[in-house]
Image: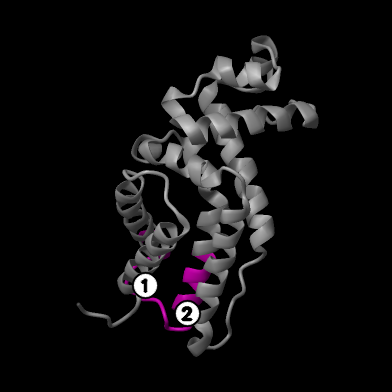
Amino acid sequence: MISDRALDLAIRDRLFVAATEAFAQQGYERASLNAILAAAGMGKSSFFYYFLDKEDLFASVLEAALMRIAKAAGPVALPTKPKHFWQAAAETIERWERAVDAEPGFVGLLHAWQPMRRTASPRLLHVMDEAQNAYRTLLIRGVELGQVRSDLSIETMMALIDAIDLVLDDDFHRNPPPDAAALENHRFRVMDLVRRAITPGIRQ
């Protein structure tokens, strides 16, 4: 969204609700910008005053949802003792998961985002900064407490976590929309592999 142009909040809310529904149900490519604007009661000239294109709208919708999720999840609780690290990390991730589940349409938005992850523009990559920062903060404390490996840089481990998430998400999103049990199982698989990859001294 073009940051120095203030869109009326009521209009923005209608637009973002319509866009969330379209992107979540149809995916990014198939979602029609014209249909979204019609559902929101917004003209094209007004839209292009505030947004660059459909991708800018998609990124703005994701950003707004992630800001609400981050607020609902609350700050990252940093443990002070090594024995508490993984419990604290699990509790932080669980808070994020609950906030994600409570955000209407967000799992569908992630489904729409998945095919774009390997070729995403800088604008789209930026939308995940809130979630990335939560992971980064935990990793730094984990290294300090000796619970996360120190032979790799934080950014290398961030890239490793992202790669694990990307590969497992590719598999997960090939299937029909998940039920609660499938989503929980997927999250467990991601967390299990991440922990195996970044814990010192684990050999398989």
**Residue 118's spot in the image, x, y percent?**
34, 40
Please report the bounds of the magenta region as a residue range.
136-156
Q: Secondary structure at mark 2?
A: helix
174 with respect to 182 (left or right): left
Quarter occupied by the N terminus: top right
| Mark 2 residue crowding within 10 angstroms, few (<14) / some (14–19) / many (20+) | some
Point out which mark residue 195 bears.
1
Residue depicted at 44% across the width and 77% down the height = 143
2 with respect to 86 (left or right): right
Residue depicted at 33% across the width and 59% down the height = 160
Camera-side residue: 128 or 13?
Answer: 13
Q: Amino acid at mark 1?
A: Arg
Is the Cβ of the residue at disc 2 closer than 8 Å to that at disc 1? Answer: yes
Q: Secondary structure at mark 1?
A: helix
* Sequence-first disc among 2 and 1: 2
Compared to 113, does 129 lie above or below? below
Q: Is residue 168 magenta?
A: no
